[in-house]
Amino acid sequence: MAKDEIKQEDLLNIDHSPSLFKKGWMNTPVDIRPSMHCYACEPARLKVVDFPNPRVWSVMDEDWKLPKDWKETVMDAFKDRLDRFRTFKLFMDICVRCGACADKCQFFIGSADPKNMPVLRAELIRSVYRRNFTAAGKLFGKLAGARDLDYGVLKEWWYYLYQCSECRRCSVFCPYGIDMADITIIGREMTNLLGLNIDWIAAPVAFCYKTGNHLGIQPHAYKSMLEFFQDEIEEVTGVRVEPSFNRKGAEVLFITPSGDVFADPGTWTCMGYMILFHQLGIDITWSTYASEGGNFGLFTSHDMMKRLNGKMYMEAKRLGVKWILGGECGHMWRVVNQYMGTMNLDLAEGSNLENPVSPMTGTKFENANSTKMVHITEFTADLIKHGKLKLDPSRNDHRKVTFHDSCNPARAMGLLEEPRYVIKNVCNHFYEMPPSTIREQTFCCGGGSGLNAGEDVELRMRGGLPRANAVKYVHEKYGVNMLANVCAIDRAVFPGLMEYWVPEVDVTGVHELVANAMVLDGEKEKTVDLRNEPLPGMEDAEDV
Amino acid sequence: MSLKNLLLQKRSRIVKKWRDVILQTYHEQSQGFLKKKDSFGNPVGCTISEGIESLYDALLEDSEDSGSDKISEALDSIMKVRAIQDFSPSRAVGFVFGLKKVIREELGNEILQNGSHEEWAAFDARIDGLGLLGFDIYANCRQKISDIRVNEVRTRSYRLLQMAGLSYDLSEHEGDPNGEKKEDGASNGQHNMEAREH
């Protein structure tokens, strides 16, 4: 790949205008750069789930070791998906290139790379569609915006398909509602048929398939981790919470992303769930098999998403629960809200699942009737509304909080008010970021859709720039020092993003704030919060 | 008229041309977008435009001391962005020297006519200093990205090591000079091992 290697004589003659695009995007070959892509996946990941072309390969190699008939495979897959998905066919045909989406993608805003304009990113694929599936494209080629699929084009597809976080921000601004995420999903699905998976997605998929969670944590380790949290919670609150595992006959099954069980700052959110359930005395159980709310299958193929999601209903049926409560996660809720009911509900046939009703308030969560699964901020907002929680928001007075709408709960679920309602009831200092950066228009953290790997940190710094910029604004204007969110990937990605752009701001889940504000039955005099940081006014207490 | 007065007189024209020097390092198709005035929709363009203005004003300040903080701050905001974009180090920082060319184009004749060679030489040296400072900031940004990468890996595995009894948390041991609690809010949410070890 071409690099910016500067020779000594060039230093006197630095050209300030890059050659790229002078000859048009279609004639500008892709330049794959380190730290802008994720690593190729190891063959073992693919073998586990019977995915095609497992082999050792590297993104930076010229030869990606494709199957000999790779073009036919892609074209067959293309045709198959055009037939199966009417949306995909429409999105290939109806774009008028008005440009409304062009400057809405955070990866374009942060990188200024025109191929990250959603319209152009889609055009990478549309051009091949026109050449192969439209009369104009077949007859007039480039004049009709059409081109053949060759090795370079395939690499370009791949490179930019993994610079889209499937966040759907662009679709909010498209007058036709073209959903770039759908195009990316199908683009990845097609390239995965050639074995072009990335390890950061393929490994969690394989682990999830084998053990139930992305990290490959086995049941005993999962249980041990929560037991470890029991000790930490007791140390801070004086209350011993008692979670139950795989308990048959429980009323509710709780499923949350495994990231919250194993990595800070999500761990404190996880402790928040445990504290909430204990205080309520709700008949709820954790599962060490359905031990993952997230679903990296969504970033792989529709079929893989369905295979991984099935465990939720199967475990609900096995345990005999009445409904499922889901933790704070992003893409999990796109899968649950938009796919799960129609995709897998048949697996629950013969189970005890019924329309969810809060045992504390009697509230019927009618919005969840089709899936039997309720978002925890809906559940908690309802508790607060009915006065079921004793709260002391001053315990969070050292936090000046803003809220980041995670892409999927916001745009794929419409979960906009509940988290805010909860935060405002557990914190005294809450400040919104500018309107064009929140709610339906929220910017992505830069790490969605499996892009939160270690090796592509530079890509994430670009994609996360618009979000960080808005956080910086409320930090400077209001002194905001805490970025709350309802997504495990946010909690994994934001600490690094903040460290670079706004180092004064920390990251939290909503239920960490809830638990810190809760007044528990039998609690000791609290001096610290779940992070072991002193509560306001307790800075000089002895055990701080 | 002194060089400084000339530079003040032609401020808006010079600043605009200098900004264009930076924007020309981006793809042609993106340059129009980068000129949009929307600090939340176009943070890169706005950071550059605002940063360039602040830099120019700070360069013209009489006292080098009072100007240096402002110079660092303005340059930092621009370099932070360019350090994570598709630029080689020379391309990322090179725009600083573009100011010389812009000033020569705009004020070359006046400098010759007024005999302001010495003033120009001194100002030219300030721009050189700015370039060197830019390299320092660029290198710091790249180092920060590297630190973030390392910290992320450690954060992701810390709890598992702790649970497995494989990690040794020095902060739990009183009297250990390395066991001080972190006070830096930047890493509150993370197990920043570097902060623990130093």
Image (cartoon, coloured by chain):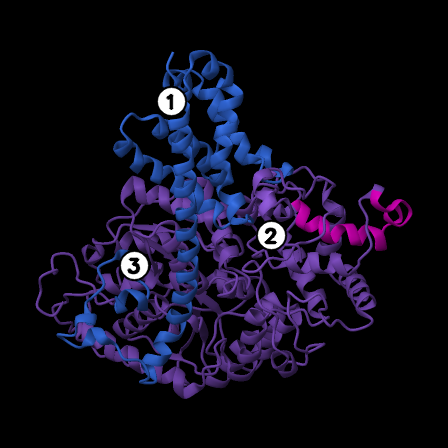
Chain colours: A purple, B blue
A128 part of magenta stretch:
yes
User: In this figure, which residue is indicated by the disc labeled 1?
Assistant: B119
Quick one: label 3 or label 2, which is nearer the N terminus? 2
Magenta segment main secondary structure: helix
Q: CA distance from mark 3 to mark 1?
A: 69 Å
Residue A20: which disc? none
User: In this figure, which residue is indicated by the disc labeled 2?
Assistant: A5
Residue B93: % across, % down: 48, 42
Q: Is residue A404 visible?
A: no
Q: Are marks 3 and 2 in contact (CB under 8 Å)?
A: no
Residue A445: % across, % down: 47, 55
| Residue ID at (59%, 67%) | A298
Q: Nearer the viewer, residue A67 or B113?
A: B113
What span is colored magenta in the figure? A119-142
Q: Nearer the viewer, residue A64 or A503?
A: A64
Neighbours of disc 2 within 10 Å: few (<14), some (14-19), many (20+): few
A308 part of magenta stretch:
no
Residue A98: % across, % down: 68, 37
User: In this figure, which residue is indicated by the disc labeled 3?
Assistant: A384
Neighbours of disc 3 within 10 Å: few (<14), some (14-19), many (20+): some
Residue flagged by tag 2: what amino acid is it? Glu
Apparent side of residue A244 relative to residue A150 in the rendered image (left or right): left
Q: CA distance from mark 3 to mark 2?
A: 60 Å
Quadrant (top left, top right, bottom left, bottom right) of the C terminus of chain B: bottom left
Residue A133: % across, % down: 84, 54
Residue flagged by tag 3: what amino acid is it? Ile
Q: Chain of mark 2?
A: A
Q: Are marks 3 and 2 on the same chain?
A: yes
Q: Are marks 3 and 1 in contact (CB under 8 Å)?
A: no
Mark 3, mark 2: which one is toward the viewer? 2
| Residue ID at (64%, 51%) | A179
